[in-house]
Amino acid sequence: MGFYEDVINAARNKSDASVKNLVLGWHSSFLSSDDGRWGIGCVPNSRKEAHLARESHTSSIINASLFQLAELIVSPFPQEFAAATAACAALLPFPELGFPLDKILPCARGDKVAALGYEREVVPMMRDWGWKLAIFDDLRQGPDCFPVSEFPKGAKGADWVWLTPEALRDRWLPSTADILKTKKGCFLQGPGLPYLPESFANLGVTHLVTPAAKRHITEQSKDTDVENIRTYIAAGGDPWLCSEIEWRVHFTNKSIQ
């Protein structure tokens, strides 16, 4: 539980606020607070499990503050996890830095990469980058697709690892930390990640891939553009395809940059 305690403790060191908007979309969640902070969270894949609404969860979520939602990062329930990751992204945002995704990903060209979870919009790019992929996902079939239960074995034989944000909810990230630390590198993809590079580095993660509002957004247009992102997510849009979002890569350890 050390990582999750880090998240909750770091969140508590930030100022709390009431939640203004909370959206749980098909592909991601969105939250904004009364003081202007906002974040994009992770909605677990509905094809892997039924998203059953629980009234007790709904009531607690819609009356919760940023702190109270962030504390649900330990919850295995999709509804609570989606709200919690959006709150964590709002409370612990990434700096407006990082590197363009297409500038970093060639680092694994020609190497074996074990990907936990199939991201439809990302996998074609991985192949274009020359990665030798082994995908661990119970819903996919193909010569390079394997059951999730075989991920630890696959990760041991790979040079790099790519994790989706669900690795936080199903505990694959902390449970395979010893393996991840032996790799050339490990990518953890958002959305819904808190900016805690040291805590992630302790688990073997070297690269954090996160969504951010595009650089053309100015203070004058910020509210409008953030509202466009909220509307896009509310309509079931995938953050990978949103024209107002760009994906940036952040290193967890400055010495490797």
Image (cartoon, rainbow, N blue to C red):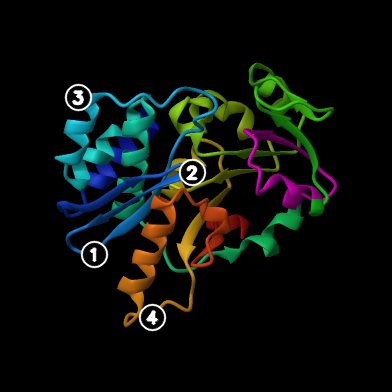
Which quarter of the image is occupied by the N terminus?
Answer: top left
Residue 111 in view in this figure: yes
245 relative to 79, above or below: below
Residue 8, image quadrant: top left
Residue 5 x/y as whole percent: 31, 33
Mark 4 falls on what kind of element?
loop
Q: Which mark is residue 27?
A: 2
**Of the image marks 2 and 4, the number of the one nearer the N terminus:** 2
Mark 2 falls on what kind of element?
loop
Measure the C-alpha gap from mark 2 to mark 4: 26 Å
Q: Which of the pair 124/160 is nearer the observer?
A: 124
Asked if the residue at tag 1 contacts the one at tag 2, i.e. Cβ–Cβ closer than 8 Å, the answer is no
Residue appearing at x 20%, y 43% in the figure: 67
Residue identified by numbered label 1: 36
Measure the C-alpha gap from mark 2 to mark 3: 23 Å
Mark 1 falls on what kind of element?
loop
